[in-house]
Amino acid sequence: MNRDEARMILQAYRPGGRDEGDPYFAEALACLKSDPELAAWFAEQQSLDVRIAGGLQQVRAPSRLKAEILAQHKAAEPPVPHWWQAWFGRQSATGWAFAVVILAVLGVSLFWNHAGSRTSFQDYSAQMVNTAVNDPHHVDRGTSSLSDGLAGMSLPSGQNPLALPPQLAGGKGLTGCRAFFWHGQNVGMLCFRPQTGGHVDLFVTSAVMFADPPPGDQPAFTVYSGSMTASWTQNGEAYLAVSHDGGEGLKELWSPEKLSGKKANSGRAVNLALALD
């Protein structure tokens, strides 16, 4: 079980240890012992659950609420068009107490949806590195055409030009593409064998899903699980390039001058050889 799967299960774990003996949570709880980051996240979520529960407990029902509910239960059912008058009339504590509870539940729901909609780019990067290096299903289809690769990535913004490094511009070295989902968002991958050498996978997704998207001016280079990565943001898209070869040629993707110099030197060597013949 990976970190994301454990988080999904532990979001339903009730505070106070009431679910400790439930086998549904056993594997996810075991992950806490070997994953300090997951354990810190779980402790924070449990603390938040306690605070929310405490806040809801402070909503006190009016003293006459029980009597009114029993009285309404015995009374004849009001006409359908005027049901709201019985619930929210000036003298009805039942309706207003019900409204307070509904608003509290909606508030908690909106909070969780907002908190869960934005994830960590670090977690995303670690998962993408694992996908690039260890997933046997590497690409959905082989292609050397950038337009074909963009279509295969199935991104909503696929019609926009990609912000590729100079050595990958125009799809140079493209060998395949892939499309999948992560946290409900489309992720596209392009597989490259660049002229600088090596094997690079480029992952592209919407930057709005991250609370900490990568920088937009210059690529940031980071190592995850022994693989060098480069990340950047442009035109609302978050990019992650993963090197399969220790990252030796990854930075060269942004150095066209170096490659041009190699080509120039090679050309001079050929001309010199012809002159000597």
Image: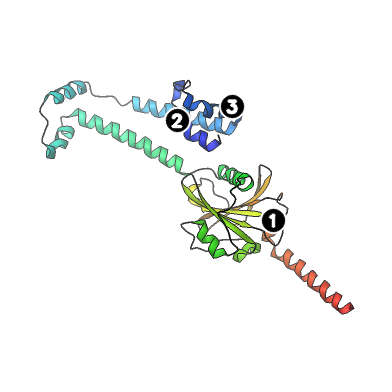
Mark closer to the observer (1, 2): 1
Whichever of callouts 3 and 2 sits on the residue coming sooner in the sequence is: 3
Asked if the residues shown at circle 1 and circle 2 are in contact, with their CB atoms under 8 angstroms apart, the answer is no
Residue ID for mark 2: 48
- Which percent across, then down, holds residue 59? 31, 27
| In the rendered image, the vertical position of residue 14 relative to residue 183, given as above or below | above
Whichever of callouts 3 and 1 sits on the residue coming sooner in the sequence is: 3
Whichever of callouts 1 and 2 sits on the residue coming sooner in the sequence is: 2
Question: Residue 90 versus residue 263: which sits nearer the camera?
Answer: 263
Q: Real-space Cα distance between discs 3 and 1?
A: 37 Å
- Which percent across, then down, holds residue 213? 54, 49
Q: Real-space Cα distance between discs 3 and 2?
A: 21 Å
| In the rendered image, the vertical position of residue 57 relative to residue 130, given as above or below | above
Residue ID for mark 3: 33
**In terms of image quadrants, where is residue 1?**
top right
- Which percent across, then down, holds residue 7? 50, 34
Hey, what amino acid is under mark 3? Answer: Lys
Query: What secondary structure is marked by label 3?
Result: helix
Is residue 165 at least partly visible in the picture? no
Is residue 66 at least partly visible in the picture? yes
Tell me the quarter of the image containing the C terminus. Answer: bottom right
Instruction: State the scheme by which the image is colored.
Output: rainbow
Q: Residue at x 43, y 30 (%)?
A: 12
Left/right placement of residue 248 relative to residue 5 reads right
Query: What secondary structure is marked by label 1?
Result: helix
Residue ID for mark 1: 251
